Each structure stands twice: as C-alpha cells, then as structure tokens.
Image (cartoon, rainbow, N blue to C red):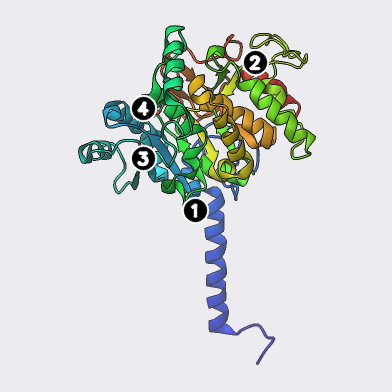
Amino acid sequence: MSGRIPQDGSRSKLLTILSFLLLTSLAFFLVPSRTSTSLWPKDSAPLVVRDIPVAGCLNDEIELDYPREKGCILILGRNEDEDELKSSLLSFESMFNARYKYPYCLLSDTPFKASFLASLRTVLHEGAVIHTGLVTHEQGWGMPDWMDKEEARRKMKAMGKSGVQYGEKESYHNMCRFYTGPFANHPLLAGFDWYWRLEPSVKFFCKLTYDPFRFLAQNNKLYGFNIAVIENINTIPTLFPTISEYRNDLIKKGEIQPTDFWKMFEADGWGNHGWGEPAGKDGKPGYNTCHFWTNFEIGNLNFLRGKQYQDLFEHLDRKKGFYHERWGDAPIRSLALALFSNFTQTHFFEDIAYVHDTWMHCPLRDGIGCECECKDKGPAIGEDAWYSCLARWKEINALHV
Ligand code: GDP
Ligand code: MN
C-alpha cells in the first residue's frame, strides 16, 4: 500500500538510518578541526571567493579534496644549478608540494643529465612527476635569426663596461627574452593552464595550506606576486617609451581602455614615488620602474599565450631591446598586465613568505600566513623601503576595496 508510514520492522530501520544521519552530521560540526584560525572559514566550500590573505592555517584535508588545477611548477635551469635547485625544492616541498603534488616542468637550452634529475628526485615527494624539455632556437632560445648578432654583441659588451647588471651576459639576455614571451608556448606546457615559477636558491617561510592555483582560478585572477620592487633604469632605457607608444596606439584604435592598473607604474603624481624616469617630451609621466619580481610568480598561461600579449612580445622583440638593452621579463610582464588585464586580476600573495638572494618577503601584519618562520631570517622588504613598490600597490588597491 502506498502513502502510509511503514509499520514495525521497516519503521525501526528508518529510525536507525535517521539517527545515523543525524549523528554523522553532528560529528561533522562538533569535531574540532586540527588547524588554527583562518579568515577563510575552514569548512567553506568551494574555497574562498574573497580577496584576503590567509590568517593562520586552513584545513588542508578539505583543501586537498578539491581537484588540482592544470598547473605545473616551472623551472628553467641548468645541470650546474643542482645544489641551489635542490635547496629550493626542499623548501617548496615541505611548505607546499609534498601535499599538493603538482608536477614539475623543467626546461633548459642544454639537456639535463640523468644524474641531475636523480639528484633532484631525492628531495621530492614519492612518485613526483617531472616533465623535462629542451628549449630549441625555434622555441625561443637565443637571438632571432633576423638580428645582426655582431651588432648585438657589441652593444652587450658596451653594457657590461658601463655597469649594466648582466649586460654582457648573452645567456641572461636569452633567459629574459624566453621568459617574456616564448616560454608560454613551449610544447612542454601545452596541457597546462597555470605555471608557478621556481628558481634556484629560494626559500619559503610559511606553510601553504591552500592551492594558490585554485585560488586564482576561482577568483578570476590571472597573476600572483609577492615582491614588487623598482628596476635599474639602465637596463631598460627605452622600454617604457616603447610600450607607452604601443599602448597609445591600441587606445586610439579602441582595442584597449586605459586602466588604473597603469597608474601603478607612472612616475609622477603619486605620493613620494618621485623616482624613476622623468616625464617624457609630451609631458606624460615616465616609468617609476616598479614591477612584480618574476623569480616568484604564479600566472595564467592562456593569458600569456593570448594574441594581445604575444603581439606585444613580437613588437618588443622587433625593437631589439632584449639584446641592444637588457630588458627584463619582469617589467614587461607587469606593464603587459596593466595594459591587458584589470588591477583586481593580479593578486598579492601576502601570506607566501619568500626569499631570493637577499630580498625577502614576509607578512608585515600580525597573524597573516600559516606557521611562518620569518623571525631572524633577515630583513623583509617593508613597504616604506625606498626600493619597494608595495605602497604604490596599496594606493591603487585602495581604489578597489
Ligand atoms: P637572477 O635571479 O635574475 O639573478 O637570474 P638567475 O641567474 O637566477 O636566472 C633566472 C633563472 O633562469 C634561473 O632559474 C636560472 O637557472 C635560469 N637560467 C639563467 N640563464 C640560463 C641559461 O643560460 N640556461 C638555462 N637553462 N637556464 C638559465
Ligand atoms: Mn634567480
């Protein structure tokens, strides 16, 4: 018969099931989580659609239940970087990737030795996936074929003599050019949407208890940084005028709109950031040389493979500045983001403490980050440091909160 409460035996079965359901859901709410407090509710699902740094630790187990993004940990390196890379990987694994298990993508212009790869493996989680690839000339290593190599080498030598950092080092110019444009189209990265760049001799000081790729993806962001500083202007004397002209053309053609992201990089009219280039002949502001430091960066590959970004790369390449000057990938990446994306699509990973060479980022505010070991590790770059661009970042950020 239908529509009637089941009798006797079936009724007690139903009660058992109901009490089981009730108890398990109570347990879910009552059993304390093993992690400490967070600005992001631990049991929130899906993760965090808020643009705030993590205070304390998240519940890793919940985080780990979500599927990974198509992300790869990108390393451009050489066999001789073995020790320095191992030290970076040891720190990276213990703070993040031993749990999140993202694959590694290793690229080089010279083949990796089996002994180098075996040695790296000793500091990675069991079963770590390592993709390796060679960067050929066609895939963007070295001066383009149409370039007058002798002329470029004369210029590089002169840069070395006049004290431009790495000015005379052709391999460094190659690296900067590759990391500006071609890397995003390398076949090794073809199946990936995201990269996290990792360099030799870096160290992380906080545990990361969420997936930054997922954070960016969920929040419709394209890029993340943790250090923003000024650049040596003698490496990029004509970069800003060149990009500004390109920008003005695009605006005239209606292909892009001016963004207030761009203001982050203009030298005048903003607080005490008077350094950088003087105003151009047209009276327009020069470049304050601020940029996101790319030795740490987490970015969206589809954005970098897109027509707007790659057209800009081609344009800059034709201007020869990767070899006639020593244009870095970092200022170009930052200015390109300001041209082609919204300010809110770049994220400051305040909770990812990090050091590269002598420059270090640690959360400046109390309680940000998970189990950070920043104390006594050296000076973090405060936003009032003369070479820091965090204050400028925050001025623009204030327009968006
Ligand atoms: P810095 O951080 O600006 O001082 O530059 P690095 O010397 O750390 O170089 C940046 C990254 O590119 C590092 O991961 C290097 O291992 C890598 N790199 C630089 N030059 C070359 C090169 O000629 N070949 C390869 N395969 N990697 C390079
Ligand atoms: Mn480096």
Q: Amino acid at mark 3?
A: Leu
Does residue 254 appear to the left or right of 213 in the view shown? right
Measure how far apart labels 4 and 3 are at the Cα level.
12 Å
The x, y position of residue 346, in whole percent, is 62, 34
Measure how far apart labels 2 and 1 are at the Cα level.
40 Å
Lower position in the chain sequence, tag 1 or tag 4: 1
Q: Residues within 10 Å of mark 2 (few under 14, many from 20)?
A: many
Does residue 216 appear to the left or right of 163 in the view shown? right
Label 2 sits on a secondary structure element that is loop
Measure how far apart labels 2 and 3 are at the Cα level.
34 Å
Q: Residues within 10 Å of mark 1 (few under 14, many from 20)?
A: few
Which residue, as the protein is rendered here, is positioned at the far left? 115
Quarter of the rendered structure image containing ligand 1:
top left
Label 4 sits on a secondary structure element that is loop
User: Mark 4 near mark 3, Cβ–Cβ under 8 Å?
Assistant: no
Q: Quadrant of the C terminus?
A: top right
Question: Which residue in the structure is indicated by mark 4?
Answer: 200
Q: Amino acid at mark 2?
A: Asn
Question: Which residue in the structure is indicated by mark 1?
Answer: 67
Q: Amino acid at mark 4?
A: Pro
Mark 4 residue's CB less than 8 Å from ligand 1? yes
Residue 288 numbered mark, or none: 2
The residue lying toward the viewer, choosing from 194 and 40, is: 194
Lower position in the chain sequence, tag 2 or tag 3: 3
Question: Which residue in the structure is indicated by mark 3?
Answer: 106
Does residue 47 appear to the left or right of 211 in the view shown? right
Lower position in the chain sequence, tag 1 or tag 3: 1
